[in-house]
């Protein structure tokens, strides 16, 4: 049996908006490094492939597209890249994948931030580029405006993608610029030969000279090539336009099926996007399905816990991803059933923290191990290694020294 890949998406006190009111929640510690260190070390104890950290350029909101004035939900968060860097020395195997906004952030800054994280973690960095979906966030920067989604738009992922198509086109360029900057230093550009006084081989540090519709970036990066060569790029995709972004530039795609049949359909749509992109068939992309999970050992307890949280919040919690309530064994059944659609793994969003994360590591993982479906030890030291992705050759090493810094 092919082993599943498993990741967790960490956010606040959990993905349910009332999660911070659970008896074992730690709302007073959400903005502390110790809180996140405890969560990530627990995820690593469970041998998970990676954790992702959410981030935005505005306060969290209940609506996808509009700010709100609610005071009964968690508001405020730490910068995802800086948080990941702080956690890197406290872990040794698990991948660290921060989310960054690419609409209001320069690609040069994104490239050196993720490259620095890869150096700090010794090759365990990933990156989830995300466009802005809220026009109000642009007011924090004052340089541009972005489309204002309507209540009608947000009922359909394709309508959202259509309204934000220009931002997705821009995101394509961001990913391309970032990848070129990661390659702007060849692997052996640093000589560090004290007796001869040669620290750097200037023929192996290259201008990228990128000129696109949205950016003109000369390069090179100020950060040497990351240990992985190219940190893992992961894209969350719900519709055709984001599928195109993932197909063209990602190593991992997160899809959000609501059923096994829906997983088949979404993977088919993604394969069509891959064919449109012209990406070689042999260039691997790992497909993960997102699921929000509420887990308890006793049948029915997880559903009861979610119902109680819904009553506290005053509404029934739903998500872009399917919501699962049940036992670790029942979740294992579902994951293995859906694996047959061609999925490589799952990114689980714990409904509450730390409860549902502990249920994943202490309940789901042992159950999958008993079935021979999940690793019993880490077998690689880099995120690419864990995912079975090759380390890419440097494009300049393949092409020769053209464009080297003089």
Image: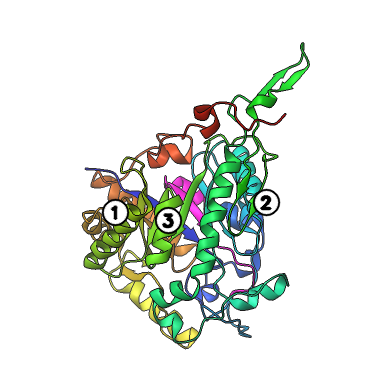
Q: Position of residue 31 (x, y in %)?
A: 66, 63
Q: Is residue 47 magenta-colored? A: yes
First to last magenta residue range: 40-60
Q: Which residue is mark 3?
A: 246
Q: Which mark is residue 136?
A: none
- Give the label, 1 or 3, closer to the camera: 3
The foreground one among 164 and 54 is 164
Q: Residue at x 23, y 62 (%)?
A: 264
Q: Position of residue 139 (x, y in %)?
A: 70, 76
Q: Is residue 151 above or below residue 60?
A: below
Q: Which residue is mark 1?
A: 343
Q: Which residue is mark 2?
A: 109
Query: Between disc 2 and disc 3, whose residue precedes?
Result: 2
- Image quadrant where residue 65 sits: bottom right
- Between the C-alphas of marks 1 and 3, the distance is 15 Å
Identify the secondary structure beneath mark 2: helix
Query: Between disc 1 and disc 2, whose residue precedes?
Result: 2
Residue 190 seen in render: yes
Identify the secondary structure beneath mark 3: helix
């Amino acid at each position: 049996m092919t082993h599943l890949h498993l990741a967790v998406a960490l956010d606040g006190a959990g993905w349910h908006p009332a999660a911070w009111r659970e008896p074992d929640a730690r709302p007073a510690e959400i903005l502390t490094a110790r809180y996140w260190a405890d969560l990530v070390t627990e995820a690593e104890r469970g041998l998970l492939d990676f954790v992702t950290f959410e981030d935005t350029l505005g306060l969290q909101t209940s609506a996808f597209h509009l700010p709100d004035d609610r005071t009964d939900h968690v508001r405020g968060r730490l910068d995802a890249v800086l948080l990941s860097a702080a956690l890197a020395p406290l872990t040794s195997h698990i991948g660290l994948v921060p989310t960054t906004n690419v609409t209001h952030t320069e690609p040069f800054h994104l490239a050196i931030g993720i490259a620095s994280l890869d150096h700090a973690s010794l090759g365990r960095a990933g990156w989830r580029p995300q466009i802005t979906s809220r026009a109000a966030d642009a007011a924090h920067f004052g340089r541009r405006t972005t489309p204002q989604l309507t209540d009608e738009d947000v009922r359909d992922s394709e309508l959202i993608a259509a309204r934000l198509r220009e931002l997705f086109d821009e995101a394509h360029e961001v990913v391309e610029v970032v990848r070129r900057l990661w390659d702007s230093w060849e692997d052996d550009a640093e000589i560090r030969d004290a007796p001869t006084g040669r620290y750097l081989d200037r023929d192996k540090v290259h201008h990228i000279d990128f000129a696109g519709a949205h950016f003109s970036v000369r390069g090179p990066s100020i950060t040497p090539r990351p240990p992985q060569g190219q940190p893992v790029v992961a894209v969350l995709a719900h519709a055709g336009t984001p599928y195109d972004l993932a197909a063209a530039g990602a190593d991992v795609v997160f899809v959000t099926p609501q059923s096994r049949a829906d997983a088949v359909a979404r993977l088919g749509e993604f394969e069509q996007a891959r064919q449109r992109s012209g990406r070689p068939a042999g260039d691997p992309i790992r497909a993960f399905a997102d699921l929000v999970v509420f887990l308890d050992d006793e049948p029915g307890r997880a559903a009861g816990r979610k119902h109680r949280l819904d009553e506290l919040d005053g509404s029934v919690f739903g998500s872009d991803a399917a919501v699962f309530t049940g036992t670790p064994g029942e979740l294992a059944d579902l994951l293995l059933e859906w694996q047959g659609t061609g999925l490589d793994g799952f990114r689980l969003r714990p409904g509450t923290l730390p409860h549902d994360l502990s249920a994943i590591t202490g309940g789901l993982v042992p159950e999958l191990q008993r079935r021979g479906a999940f690793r019993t030890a880490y077998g690689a030291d880099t995120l690419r290694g864990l995912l079975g992705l090759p380390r890419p050759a440097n494009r300049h090493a393949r092409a020769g020294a053209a464009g080297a810094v003089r």
